Amino acid sequence: MARLSSQAVPGMRYSSGVSALLLTPAKKVLSALADPARQNFSVLVVLGCYVILWTTYAVVSKSTQDIHPDTGELLTWSNELALGYWKHPPFGVYAVKAWTTIFPVEDWSLYLLGVINATLSLWIAWRVSFSLLSEERRAIGLALLTLVPFYNFLALTYNHNTLLMPLWAAATFFASAINVCTSAVQISASRAASRSWKMS
């Protein structure tokens, strides 16, 4: 019995060493994201790595497939720009046209477009969380958002659903900014009203 327990201990130490090996970089990244002095640079580095990781995944995993039909549709429509199309508004088509004037019309560049689109949404969500969460919760929230399939697997298909992600995130950002400004105005007005009431 003593021999069995002594053999189990090294295995336990090994598994805790492996978990420490995996958790140590994650703790360092989360602490960098939670540090007010380093968080802006850290989030750009983390999101840059996110773009590289998911674009590489898309290129490798989808190398035997064609691009998604919705992405192909946007690409085809971008050959002749119009003010509107029978199926969708023209914003996505203009975005693809602008993208393909800079990057080649290759599968990898369209996957990169989709991943950058999702990453922009993550960055805007990060900015929204400044007024809502503490530093630690903001870092954990960003980490949890990166696990949502809409920001990774589904973002590889650039279509009219995914191109709206940063727009919705930006709408939330501006709505929260307006809410903060409105709250500040309401607090100032109530303080002024209470001062004038005390004086009378």
Image (tube, rainbow, N blue to C red):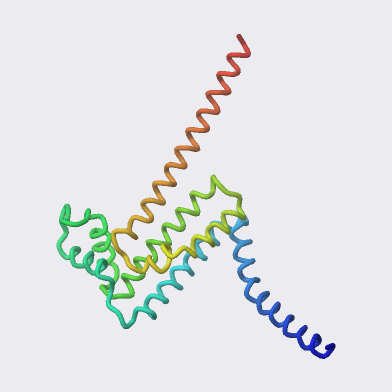
Q: Residue at x 46, y 58 (%)?
A: 122
Which is nearer the eye, 11 or 192?
A: 11
Which is nearer the eye, 88 or 107?
A: 88
**Relative to residue 183, is residue 3 depicted above or below?**
below
Q: Residue at x 63, y 14 (%)?
A: 198
Q: Quadrant of residue 139?
A: bottom right
Residue 118 on image: x %, y %? 40, 61
Q: Residue at x 42, y 43 (%)?
A: 174
Instruction: Say which quadrant the N terminus sits in.
Output: bottom right
**Relative to residue 130, is residue 48 depicted above or below?**
below
**Left or right: where does residue 21 sit relative to residue 141?**
right
Q: How many marks?
A: 0
Residue 200 on image: x %, y %? 60, 9
Residue 144 on image: x %, y %? 53, 61
**Relative to residue 47, is residue 17 depicted above or below?**
below
Q: Residue furthest front?
A: 1
Q: Quadrant of residue 187?
A: top right
Q: Residue furthest right?
A: 2
Residue 18 on image: x %, y %? 66, 79
Which is nearer the eye, 183 or 19?
A: 19
Q: Residue at x 26, y 58 (%)?
A: 92
Q: Residue furthest bottom?
A: 3
